[in-house]
Amino acid sequence: MPIRVGVVGVGNCASALVQGIEMYKHNPELEPIVAFREIGKYTPRDITFTSAFEIDGRKVGLDLAEAILQPPNNATVIFKPPRLGVTVRPGPALDGVPEGGLVLKLVEGTVEDVVKELNSTNTEVLVNYLPTGAKKAAEAYAEAALRAGAAFINAMPAPIATSEYWQRRFAEKELPLLGDDTQNQIGATVLHKTLIRLLALRGVRIKHTYQINVGGTPDFVNLMHRRGDKEKTKTAAVKMMAMGQEFDAYISPVAYIQFLGDRKIAHTLIEAEIFGGLSIRIEATLDVHDAWNSAAVVTDSIRLAKLALDRGIGGPLISASAWGFKNPPVHMSPDEAYRAVLEFIEGKRDR
């Protein structure tokens, strides 16, 4: 059975997700590169896109397969999907207009319009890819998902899955809620978390750390004006791995560099002390295609949300959120979160 999925925000991340899913569908000999090959009875090829929402006039009204290729998107194109029969509809703008002049012509809809589209397309899982800083708009789409009976995946930093208000409302409707802020397949945050966790487990005293990110995507244009939420989620995710240690941390996107295109480069430094008070220093550089780095995690999250829907489980999915997101309701180390997801898939834990 297909999993009927809607996307909010047809930017780079949506582009990578749609390209990747359709590429694997049209090339059955390719094995999807994801953490979980099957989740219940679902594989990545079971994902079907049924709705999409935007406020950029260059994308609204187009088929989703065309819209993902429109500017200012600059995600690497590895597969051009055929027409999907999904028309991009306008949604509420509110605070969801990105900074930096990225939207040339604003086209708006209402929450009621979104609910109507979700219902008419029988969308089961709604993925929120709105830009950082779009808290009110994220809440509007969460409300639309509730009214339409869809699970909600909050792939951006706005506090939805971590909000007691939204947790309660999704639980009451028996609708799964995942988030907040996608943790990439092998991104700067999960790498940084793993290093900090390793040092803490080995009894090393962490003194200082920083992680600075530069990139050439439209997301970085927006982040230069709205970096606050991203700084908070990334810093909290890293510090939670230190087993109670206190240390100085600076974690932030610091520059938009146009010629990098869809790449993000993250520089991480950790300074610490070992036995005897002697110093150690760890430096790591990660260079990734940013949008594609998120697609695998969202692919798994969609299937985990659908599995929860099938089981009638509503409210925050603790295991899936801890594994796939920077700021989940409950933080876990990467290995703990992975085991928790396996237990959820096997039916050994409720959420």
Image: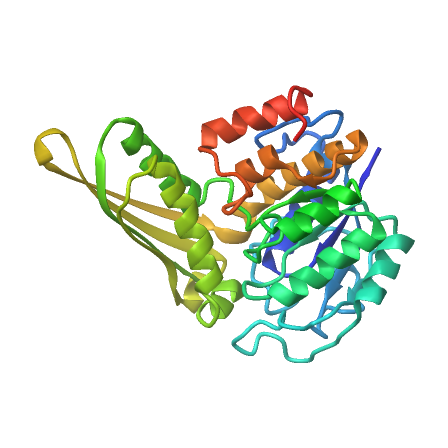
Task: Let me know if residue 10 appears in the view.
Answer: no
Question: Position of 142 compared to 323: left or right?
Answer: right
From the viewer's perspective, is 257 left or right of 96?
left
- Specify how the rendered protein is coloured: rainbow
Query: Quadrant of residue 63 in the image?
Result: bottom right
What residue lies at 76% left-to-right and 74% top-to-bottom? 108
Query: What is the x, y in percent for residue 127?
Result: 69, 51
Question: Which residue is at 60% across, 66% downward?
Answer: 134
* Residue nearest the observer in this picture, 185 or 182: 182
Q: Quadrant of the N terminus?
A: top right
Q: In which quarter of the image is the C terminus?
A: top right
Q: Is 84 placed above or below 32 here? A: below
For the image, the number of numbered tags is 0
Q: Where is residue 274 in the image (x, y as percent from the top left)?
A: 15, 32
Q: Which residue: 64% across, 66% down?
A: 136
* Residue at 60 percent of width and 23 percent of height: 342
Residue 333 vertical placement versus 84 (above, below): above
Query: Residue 101 or 69: which is nearer the viewer?
Result: 101
Furthest toward the right, the residue is 120
Can residue 131 be seen in this snapshot? yes
Q: Where 253 falls versus 79 (above or below)?
A: below
**Is 327 on the left-hand or right-hand side of 268?**
right
User: What x and y, as percent, mark residue 260?
Assistant: 43, 61
- Answer with left or right where residue 145 lies relative to residue 95: right
Q: Is residue 200 above or below residue 186?
A: above
Q: In which quarter of the image is residue 77?
A: bottom right
